[in-house]
Image (cartoon, rainbow, N blue to C red):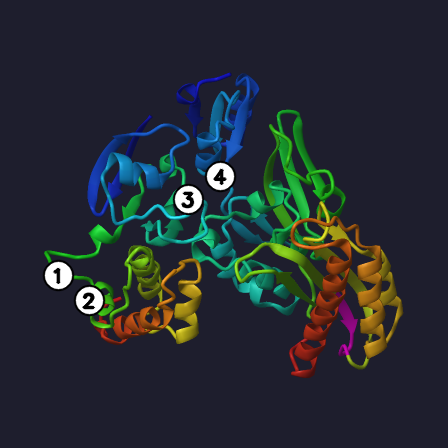
Amino acid sequence: MKLDFTLNGESVSVEAPPYASLLSVLRDRLSVRSTKQGCDYGGCGACTVLIDGKARYSCMTSALRVKRKSVTTLEGLAKNGVLDPLQQAFNEKWAAQCGFCSAGMILSAKALLDETKYPSESEIREAIVGNLCVCTGYQKIVEAIQSASINSPKTSK
Amino acid sequence: MTSLTSIKYIVPKSVEELLAVIGSEENPRIVAGNTLLNELGKRNLLGGVTALIDINELPLDYVKLGEDSITLGSLVTFTRLLREDFINRPAYSALKEALSAVHPIQVRNAATIGGCIGAGLPFLDVPPALLCLDAVIQITTCDGTQTNEYSKLASDIAGGIPAGQLITKIQLPKYNDRTRSAYSRFSLTGMGESVASVAIRLTLDGSLAHSHCTQACVAIGGAGIDTQRISEAETFLTNSGHTTTDVLQHTSDLVAKEAHIVPDLNGSAEFKRKILSVQTKRTLSKLLAADSRGAKL
């Protein structure tokens, strides 16, 4: 079936079978490789994407559910070659070890910061509870999200 | 067997259109969150299904506050429900705590209130909370619409609502300020399924510590094959007057004794009874603690 949606700000059109997951369409048909396939049943968060701004597991989302919706992956965060403050903070705080969870972590954090500009540490931990870091580098990740929050422009959302 | 590639994907815009589709398709399957669809497809478990009917465009994503009840469309997500004002009232704390027990934001953003009832899975958090709040469920089929108390429906839909039936709305009574509720659960891991959970609603005459309970509802999940109400514990709480330590202990004992428990990989029957007893005490203690902090009853 034909599927039209917005991916990182650009309209895309792709054929997808009714049972295909958004993850498989992103990776196998649209070559979006930042979105990782981890557990593939909604347990690890490596496949997290934003659908209309909300964090969702793409492995548990039917591709056809995103028809006419906006999907954001890690590739959609940097603008004109400038990293998103969250990406910058992950770099500066050494919040990535093997990096497998980073895309999902950053997108879960992005959904949080878009709604809550200055979240508490417990709010940050709650926001990333569905994202597993097998390297157990949670402290650095939380610090990076706090840093991105503090450094975000006061006037912007 | 139907080829996976020949499965139709239909998105009806109204309940009437949906019912027409159900009537015309040989073997339709209603999908909402679609969270298991990919997994079923990969395992060749969609054999025989002729059409997937996506109900997400039905006008069932609403919350209406009425004079006597609160009506939830079945497509309301957990995230949306947690943002509603009514959920912060003491009477609905059990529902708030149960929704919050679903930890990954990603799941809360997808899971719907109708889906968690229709799944009929005993280890889900929200059903016991809905049961203790005396939820009423509306189900629509090709033959018409039926409204049932969830307490009478829970065992019938254990394991999943039958094909061709659609949960359209959930009604919760509007409780007065003397009613409060709480929910507690136990799981083996932080994000694991509930091994035993307890939701309790009490209506009180005066403060919990100094007056008696005029109405009680005790619901459990996780331990058996369905979500259950423990009427013996409800009767005891209602008749016991002041809520003392002895009352807490006896209520917990009753819940553990009367619950229909099925041992599984998460624990033996004995283990689950013990956990249920502890969770009952914790839930009642939570209600007492909230009262002693001066929360409005």
Q: Which residue is mark 3?
A: A40
Q: Amino acid at mark 3?
A: Asp
Magenta stretch, residue numbers: B202-208
**Residue at far left of view:** A80
Q: Amino acid at mark 4?
A: Leu
Q: Are marks 2 and 4 in contact (CB under 8 Å)?
A: no
| Both marks 2 and 4 on one chain | no
Q: From mark 2 to mark 1, how far is it between C-alphas?
A: 9 Å
Q: Position of residue A13 (x, y in %)?
A: 24, 32
Which residue corresponds to the image point at 63% horizontal and 29% vertical from the top-left? B141
Element under disc 2:
helix
Please tell me which residue lies in front, B77 or B146: B77
Please tell me which residue lies in front, B242 or B297: B242
| Both marks 1 and 3 on one chain | yes
Is residue A40 visible in the rendered image? The answer is yes
Which residue corresponds to the image point at 76% horizontal and 65% vertical from the top-left? B277
Element under disc 1:
loop
Q: Position of residue B27 (x, y in %)?
A: 55, 21
Specify the quadrant that holds the C terminus of chain A.
Answer: bottom left
Q: Which residue is mark 2?
A: A88
Task: State the mark number for residue A82.
Answer: 1
Q: Amino acid at mark 1?
A: Val
- Circle nearer the viewer, 3 or 4: 3
- Circle nearer the viewer, 1 or 3: 3
Q: Position of residue B84 (x, y in %)?
A: 51, 60
Q: Which residue is mark 4?
A: B36
Q: From mark 2 to mark 3, how far is it between C-alphas?
A: 28 Å
